Image (cartoon, coloured by chain):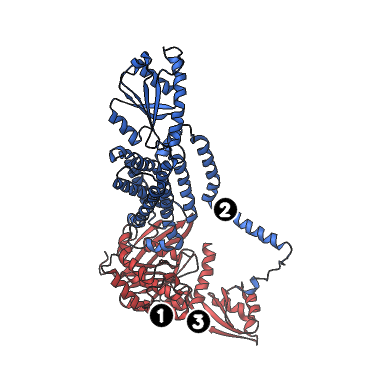
């Protein structure tokens, strides 16, 4: 190699339009980098498309197919007709028929149904006598939006439906009275619904980000290489990275719930200990998912983006922002795969309805299953070598 | 287990590709226990990849071998327990203090008294008084000492050092090498990659690797002898002009400036003599036959291998 190989540059430098040229140089560089960053590129397309589809198709504040139960204390033709009429409105879907008040209450408490109709004993006879008996309707008003829309529509739809269906003819007024009872949140205070929901939402966001950055940070700082050369196993790395944040999450949950109780007057009707246990489960599930994300991505930016990709549907499809029952079937299936959906049911049920573990078995199991799934993926995805 | 076996590293036919590009090609090597083995070669020649294969961070596409008697494919976990690997880039936690970093390593390896082990190491490294300083705030030389300390903390049998002295001042480099010799004297095997010729000369044995091929290995003297290179040192006026004229002439394999002199080397003595003859008699140039330096040998090897493999 000699000086002769490197003639001095013969390209002269021109100062004209320097501002634009330098801006242009920067712009070209940014475009090239953007093009190389596949995940960012995908996000540019995916985020708006996902938002649009979710808001456009999945979100529907007018609920339909509300899971409902009927407490039948008399099995009469009239009762059957009323149920049929209700179901024909497409607002309600009767999943359970019970004959016992306790079963009825438990269904509402566990969140298996959001709506219940009670047909009292001697109902048909009272109607025939013109006594205008009461048809009792109980709605789970922990989500006031879903409940009020359904209750509001009740009177009219039943009357129109019965007009065609009943032999009563065309009565001047309703042959019976609909007495709606908004359970758990009679004043339809939205803070009662939102504060418990926020517990889950805030925890999802913070927990995801904490662990989503954890592995990529080691890779980016170069500490991963020496960590991998030491005798530590993927599961050990995972537990070591998750457990400190379980504590952090616990403190956060305590803060939010405390503020909700003190400032917004949200009650905690259920067992505080149960709430703490299931919140810890939820926190761990989110940490495990965040950790899984961090084993899938290349750098911290991608980790943030993927966390957003997970967080967005969590907010929209979990029933936090919009009634779960209002979403089409596919969106509900997606929602069932999100930990926030289950935790929202748990936290609302414990705080507002005083639900017990018996009522919440399904959602607790779902959370545990999601956590194990995330951990399994994380441990198998964790690369023990630099290949 | 190769009990009583004197070989720490024994690998055959290692090959590794990334994205269709072969980074290590059919590499075989043996390193004796208790020796310091220097690993030399240009950037991107496969040194780091080879070291990573040896400590189980990469799996070779083909080839086999043992490290401390353990199979490099099957027993990566056992190898990791007994090997200290010092990465090219500082890879301790910058936001942990000196003491916290050492205690972390000590706990990871399951040392019984992690605090005590860290304390002893701090004393040994001469870092007393700085144990609470963040690792990221240390100077380059201290960082590298700390990294070596972290590697040796769990008393490994083999040290793999990947360009440990890059960017470190000469005094710190010398101290570092004295430490390595002291460790080797205690029976530790050291494999160290480097770009520095003076460091190569401090190794018991060296290997030169370029474009994934191990080209030559042996003691420094053996490597120089094997090269069969004839070298002239030229001093005088207008050496730049001479460089341009000699480059590419038959028999002239390498022309390299060294300060105020020029090294002209070739393998074919007769052709070299013929090519330089017109300049031998010039009064403003002085020609002295000299023995090639290790650097001459390596640069010549490198340019030759470039023709063969690229």
The residue labelled by disc 1 is B175
Visual hue assigned to chain A: blue
Mark in front: 1 vs 3: 1
Q: What secondary structure is marked by label 2?
A: helix
Report which residue position mark 3 lands on: B291
Pinpoint residue A226: horizontal percent, then vertical percent: 39, 64
Residue A199 location (% of width, % of height): 40, 47
Question: In which quadrant of the rendered image does the N terminus of chain B lie?
Answer: bottom left
In which quadrant is the C terminus of chain B drawn? bottom right
Mark 2 → mark 3, Cα distance in angstroms: 53 Å
Vertical arrangement, residue B279 with respect to residue B10, above or below: below
* Res. B302 in view: yes
Whole-number angstrom distance, CA of label 1 to CA of label 3: 29 Å
Question: Picture quarter containing residue A217?
Answer: bottom left
Q: Residue at x 35, y 15 (%)?
A: A77
Measure how far apart labels 1 and 2 are at the Cα level. 45 Å
Q: Secondary structure at mark 1?
A: helix
Please state the total of marks drawn on the protein image: 3
- Disc 3 element: loop
Quarter assignment of residue B9: bottom left
- The red-tinted chain is B
Residue placed at 42% from the left, 37% from the top?
A187
């Amino acid at each position: 190699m000699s000086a002769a190989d490197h003639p001095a540059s013969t390209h002269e430098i021109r100062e004209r339009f320097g501002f634009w040229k330098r801006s242009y140089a920067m712009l070209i560089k940014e475009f090239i980098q953007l093009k190389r960053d596949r995940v960012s590129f995908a996000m540019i397309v995916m985020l708006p498309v996902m938002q649009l589809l979710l808001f456009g198709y999945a979100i529907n504040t007018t609920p339909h197919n509300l899971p409902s139960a009927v407490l039948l204390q008399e099995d009469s033709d009239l009762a059957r007709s009323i149920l049929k009429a209700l179901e024909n409105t497409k607002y309600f879907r009767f999943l359970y028929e019970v004959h016992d008040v306790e079963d009825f209450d438990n269904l509402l408490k566990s969140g298996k149904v959001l709506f219940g109709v009670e047909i009292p004993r001697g109902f048909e006879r009272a109607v025939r006598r013109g006594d205008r008996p009461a048809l009792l309707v109980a709605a789970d008003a922990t989500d006031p939006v879903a409940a009020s829309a359904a209750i509001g529509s009740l009177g009219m739809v039943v009357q129109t439906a019965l007009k065609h269906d009943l032999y009563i003819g065309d009565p001047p007024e309703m042959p019976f009275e609909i007495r709606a009872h908004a359970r758990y949140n009679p004043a339809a205070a939205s803070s009662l619904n939102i504060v418990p929901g926020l517990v889950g939402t805030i925890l999802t966001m913070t927990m995801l980000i904490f662990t989503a950055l954890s592995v990529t940070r080691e890779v980016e700082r170069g500490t991963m290489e020496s960590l991998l050369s030491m005798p530590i196993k993927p599961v050990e790395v995972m537990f070591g990275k998750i457990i400190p944040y379980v504590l952090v999450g616990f403190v956060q949950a305590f803060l939010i719930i405390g503020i909700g109780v003190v400032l917004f007057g949200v009650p905690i009707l259920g067992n505080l200990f149960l709430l703490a246990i299931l919140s810890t489960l939820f926190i761990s599930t989110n940490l495990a998912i965040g950790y899984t994300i961090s084993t899938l991505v290349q750098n911290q930016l991608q980790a943030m983006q993927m966390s957003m990709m997970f967080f967005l549907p969590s907010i929209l499809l979990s029933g936090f922002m919009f009634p779960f029952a209002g979403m089409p079937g596919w969106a509900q299936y997606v929602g069932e795969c999100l930990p926030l959906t289950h935790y929202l049911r748990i936290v609302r049920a414990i705080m507002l309805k005083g639900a017990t573990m018996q009522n919440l078995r399904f959602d607790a199991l779902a959370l545990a299953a999601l956590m194990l799934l995330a951990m399994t993926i994380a441990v198998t995805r964790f690369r023990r070598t630099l290949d | 287990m190769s009990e009583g076996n004197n070989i720490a590293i024994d690998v055959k036919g290692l090959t590794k590709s990334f994205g269709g590009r072969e980074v290590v090609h059919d590499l075989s090597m043996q390193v004796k226990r208790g020796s310091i083995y220097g690993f030399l070669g240009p950037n991107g020649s496969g040194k780091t990849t080879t070291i990573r294969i040896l400590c189980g961070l990469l799996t070779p596409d083909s080839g086999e071998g043992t490290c401390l008697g353990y199979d490099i494919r099957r027993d990566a976990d056992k190898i990791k327990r007994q090997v200290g690997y010092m990465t090219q880039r500082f890879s301790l936690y910058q936001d942990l203090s000196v003491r916290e970093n050492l205690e972390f390593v000590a706990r990871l390896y399951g040392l019984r008294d992690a605090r005590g082990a860290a304390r002893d190491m701090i004393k040994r490294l001469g870092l007393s008084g700085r144990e609470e300083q963040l690792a990221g705030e240390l100077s380059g030389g201290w960082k590298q000492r700390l990294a070596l300390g972290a590697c040796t903390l769990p008393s490994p049998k083999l040290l793999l050092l990947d360009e440990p002295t890059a960017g470190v001042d000469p005094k710190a480099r010398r101290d570092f090498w004295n430490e390595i010799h002291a460790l080797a004297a205690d029976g530790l095997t050291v494999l160290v990659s480097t770009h520095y010729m003076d460091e190569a000369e401090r190794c018991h044995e060296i290997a030169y690797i370029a474009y994934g091929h191990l080209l030559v290995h042996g003691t420094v003297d053996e490597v120089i002898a094997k090269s069969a290179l004839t070298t002239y040192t030229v001093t005088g006026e207008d050496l730049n002009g001479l460089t341009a004229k000699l480059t590419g002439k038959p028999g002239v394999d390498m022309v390299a400036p060294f300060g105020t002199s020029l090294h002209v080397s070739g393998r074919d003595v007769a052709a070299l003599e013929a090519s330089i003859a017109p300049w031998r008699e010039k009064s403003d140039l002085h020609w002295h036959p000299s023995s090639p330096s290790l650097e001459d040998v390596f640069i010549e090897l490198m340019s030759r291998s470039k023709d063969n493999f690229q």
